[in-house]
Image (cartoon, rainbow, N blue to C red):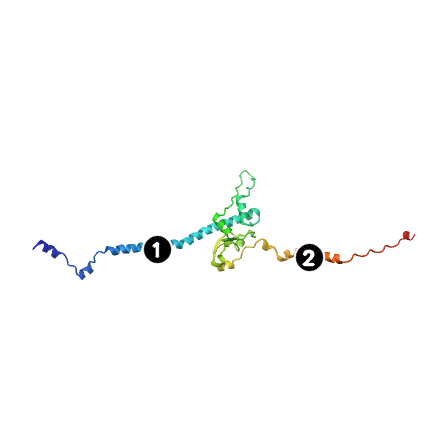
């Protein structure tokens, strides 16, 4: 037998049955599968980054709102009133009060004033964050927590973040914000009756002066004759 015939007899012939039992190695399909899987991972990574980005921004905004509440309360504690504007609060931050005098050997602690982030100050100046100035604060944190001290400008329509008068940052919906009361201010404490009372008194005094002016002067009473005049 020839060697060529022997090699041909050992080589199995390709039939449909042998192809099903021993499928050929198809590298292009594996490459395509790997590329497809890589594209899926890439798309998932891009969209997951977009989904988690608002959460990071929300955490950053909450961390910026908290110093505002601390600085507001520090101002109220040192000056016994609330700041009237952002400039008033910034002036307090730039010019902190002097430390208390030392009564003993140990020197007193220095006064530490919390600073407000520049990004938050720009948002307040642009009107994107609303702050209630001249607020009436109490010594009770639980009572202050019932009112809002600052909030995002579009919270009534789209929801957003708000700062309570106790310094706690909340994420509220539009409905929750509308149900949350705002902190009262110094001007709110003036009652309308008290404001109208001086005007009423001044009106009464004016009417009295007019009535006195309209009355004719009283005639002088005749002098009584005395024995000296008769003589």
Residue, disc 1: 43
Disc 2 packing (10 Å; few <14; some 14–19; many ≥20)? few
Return the x and y of residue 192 as percentages of the image width and height: 62, 57
Q: Is residue 170 left or right of residue 47?
A: right
Asked if residue 53 is positioned above or below residue 17 in the image, the reply reads above
Query: Could you tell me if residue 57 is visible in this image?
Result: yes
Of the residues under marks 1 and 2, which one precedes in the sequence?
1
> Between 125 and 36, which is closer to the camera in this rendering?
125
Q: Secondary structure at mark 2?
A: helix
For the point 25% across and 55% down, the residue is: 28
For the point 34% across and 54% down, the residue is: 42
Disc 1 packing (10 Å; few <14; some 14–19; many ≥20)? few
Return the x and y of residue 141 as percentages of the image width and height: 53, 52
Query: Could you tell me if residue 164 is visible in this image?
Result: no
The total number of labels drawn is: 2
Q: CA distance from mark 1 to mark 2?
A: 77 Å
Which residue, as the protein is rendered here, is positioned at the far bottom? 16
Return the x and y of residue 203 as percentages of the image width and height: 68, 57
For the point 29% across and 54% down, the residue is: 35
> Between 96 and 205, which is closer to the camera in this rendering?
205
Return the x and y of residue 164 as percentages of the image width and height: 51, 53
> Between 79 and 121, which is closer to the camera in this rendering?
121
Residue, disc 2: 203
For the point 75% across and 58% down, the residue is: 214
């Amino acid at each position: 037998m020839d060697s060529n015939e022997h090699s041909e007899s050992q080589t199995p012939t390709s039939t449909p049955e042998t192809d099903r039992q021993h499928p050929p190695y198809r590298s292009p399909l594996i490459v395509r599968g790997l590329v497809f899987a890589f594209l899926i991972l890439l798309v998932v990574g891009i969209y997951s980054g977009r989904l988690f980005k608002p959460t990071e921004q929300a955490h950053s905004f909450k961390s910026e709102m908290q110093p505002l509440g601390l600085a507001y309360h520090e101002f109220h504690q040192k000056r016994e009133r609330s700041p009237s504007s952002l400039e008033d609060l910034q002036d307090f931050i730039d010019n902190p009060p002097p430390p208390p005098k030392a009564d003993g050997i140990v020197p007193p602690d220095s006064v530490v004033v919390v600073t407000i982030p520049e990004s938050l100050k720009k948002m307040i100046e642009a009107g994107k964050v609303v702050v209630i100035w001249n607020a009436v604060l109490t010594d009770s944190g639980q009572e202050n927590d019932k009112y809002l001290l600052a909030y995002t400008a579009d919270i009534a329509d789209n929801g957003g973040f708000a700062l309570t008068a106790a310094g706690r940052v909340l994420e509220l919906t539009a409905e929750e914000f509308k149900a949350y009361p705002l902190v009262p201010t110094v001007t709110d404490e003036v009652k309308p009756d008290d404001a109208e009372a001086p005007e009423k008194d001044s009106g009464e005094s004016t009417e009295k002066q007019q009535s006195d002016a309209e009355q004719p002067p009283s005639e002088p009473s005749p002098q009584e004759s005395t024995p000296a005049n008769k003589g």
